[in-house]
Amino acid sequence: MSVLLYFDALSSPLGPAERNLVAVGQRLATDGELAAVLGTAPAADVLAELGSLGVPAVFTDQEELSDQLARGQADLLVGAVRAATAQAVLAPVTPAETEVLARAAAVTESGIITGADAVEADLTASKPVLAGAARSVVRAGTPTVMITLRPGAAEPEVTGGDPALVLHPESAARRGATITARTVHEQGNRPDLGDARTVVAGGRGTDGDFSAVQDLADALDAAVGASRVATDSGWVEHDLQVGQTGRIVSPELYIAAGISGAVQHVAGMRTAGTIVAVNTDEDAPLLEMADLGIVGRLQDVLPQAADEIRRRRQGA
Amino acid sequence: MSKTSAPPVRILVLAKYVPDAQFPRHFDAQHRLERTESILSELDEYAVEVALQLSEEHGGDKESPVTVLTLGGEAASAAVKKALQMGATDGVHVLDDAVAGSDALATSRVLESAVRRLEPDLVITGMASTDAETGVIPSMLAARLGWPQLTLAASVQLSEDATTISAQRDEDGVSLSMTSQLPAVVSVTDQVGEPRYPNFKSILAARKKPVQTLSLADLGLSPDLVGPTGSAVTVLQAGDVPARPAGRVIVDDGEAGLALVDFLADRKLL
């Protein structure tokens, strides 16, 4: 089977979600028919790393696509699908990469499956649906199938090949919407919400003061998340929102402080390994769902826990 | 605030009729979602709101009508009705039994035909449906039409001469500004502003607003191109995930923070 991996951009070394995707590609591809398609021209160290992971070729556009939204990237992907006679196209489940696959799927009349967490050799895919309350198993019957994958922990095999060869497929030079400005937000030193093994999230119960949430997050080396109430109120940046209209996270540990557990929020974190909830309202839905529920004030519980963690680490 | 001097713009809003996420949702024997207790998708209300605001800035519904389009069985007309109550000008309901069970590929095909027939300058959608949650329809529709997409917009502006659309989008750690000429497909997030509530007057007014019903034949589409035959993706299994096992709930006695750390240590999460 010929398999393409699509990324808007790659930097070396590859992150865990990207390594997982390469591992799934290695498993599905036969006869070494595995290639990457990159929306951004790769640096030499990316080509070397991909080559060493058994990805012998990379398709990129001859033109710069970074000022385009989805259209140029999708046209590149369509060209690569045709050049490689791809049967499967895999990409991370980010909104931007999903849009590129969606456009390419419409142009090539291919089935598209979003948010899969497992893909079989025959491209049967499993995915959470209904905000994580149910699961489905789906299969697409088209010559090419496009699948976006949730982050996983599979590790690719190091095969030790030469640096990947850069190829430019033929693609229509059409333009879509133009990106006229990019404003980067200050992220600080905390881990990214999407990759973090631990997330400490705050909601209405913080009353706008996230210091206790941030302090426990730092003690646990965790990312900070928030409910929609907290981001809509402007207490923290919108990109920290966990939920159906924000980020979907699946950390080993999720600590929800002062978050009641609306359907919209639970959709973003229900697959977490261990859930801890702290809330003054004993009827909060998240307290019922949590592995450990604490009825109490987060302003008391979180600082005590953070101090205790630091004390134990110092003593160790 | 309406500027009658501004050139008109015709806006089409896509509205999906979905099961209310506040109630338990279930699949039937064909692995299709049971559509009882259904409503206009909450995320589509934001699309209606933005459409109404842009219309108001361009002469209101006489000059710049907002048409709401839905696809689905008889009951889906409730989604159109809600949008009309919010203030949309008229409605279109693509109603054909053959459409049931369409995947995103087939759905985008029907939407493309409807857009080509209705010829709007601007299509506005929600960021995703609250049932299938794929978020791919705006992109697929834009690709089929050959139009630019300004998707996942947190704010939208239409130029005074109604030729250029601009939008802002938030990604992880970065905000993008984007722009294109019309026609275009725009999808909006829940950050664009609270959707208005229908009031008594607008509810009464909605009863007099026209709703056109179109069949696949009206759109020039063969039934083979939609429904299970026209779809690429087949659902083999679908079912509820078992509930998480019940956990432990404690009341803070002044030492719950320590209990939390003990719990994390037990689970080797420190």
Image (cartoon, coloured by chain):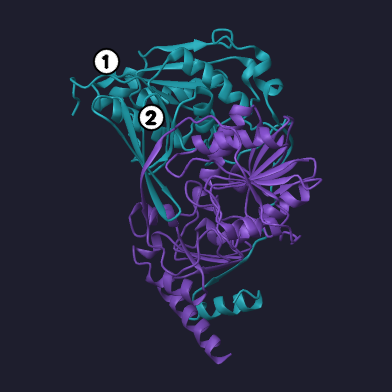
Chain colours: A purple, B cyan
Q: Secondary structure at mark 2?
A: helix
A195 in relation to B16, above or below:
below
In the image, what residue occupies the spot 47% across and 23% down? Answer: B78
Q: Which residue is mark 1?
A: B62
Q: Amino acid at mark 2?
A: Val
Query: How far is the residue under mark 2 from the one under mark 1?
Result: 17 Å
Label 2 environment density (alpha carbons within 10 Å; few <14, some 14–19, many ≥20): many
Q: Quadrant of residue A272?
A: bottom right
Residue A83 versus residue B17: which sits nearer the camera?
A83
Chain of the residue that carries numbered disc 2 in the rendered image: B
- Please state if B82 lies on the left or on the right of A98 as rendered: left
| Both labels 2 and 1 in a single chain | yes
Q: Secondary structure at mark 1?
A: helix
- Please state if A143 lies on the left or on the right of B134 as rendered: right
- Please state if A144 lies on the left or on the right of A230 as rendered: right
Between discs 2 and 1, the one toward the N terminus = 2
In the image, what residue occupies the spot 37% across and 71% down? Answer: A211
**Can you give x and y, in whole percent of width and height, for residue A176 in the image?**
44, 32
Q: Is residue B266 visible?
A: yes
Label 1 environment density (alpha carbons within 10 Å; few <14, some 14–19, many ≥20): few
Residue B135 versus residue A11: which sits nearer the camera?
A11
In the image, what residue occupies the spot 39% across and 59% down? Answer: A204
**Can you give x and y, in whole percent of width and height, for residue B190 in the image?**
41, 42
Q: Which residue is mark 2?
A: B48
B268 in relation to A224, above or below:
below
Chain of the residue that carries numbered disc 1 in the rendered image: B
**Can you give x and y, in whole percent of width and height, for residue A237 in the image?**
38, 57
Q: Amino acid at mark 1?
A: Lys
B231 in relation to A147, above or below:
above
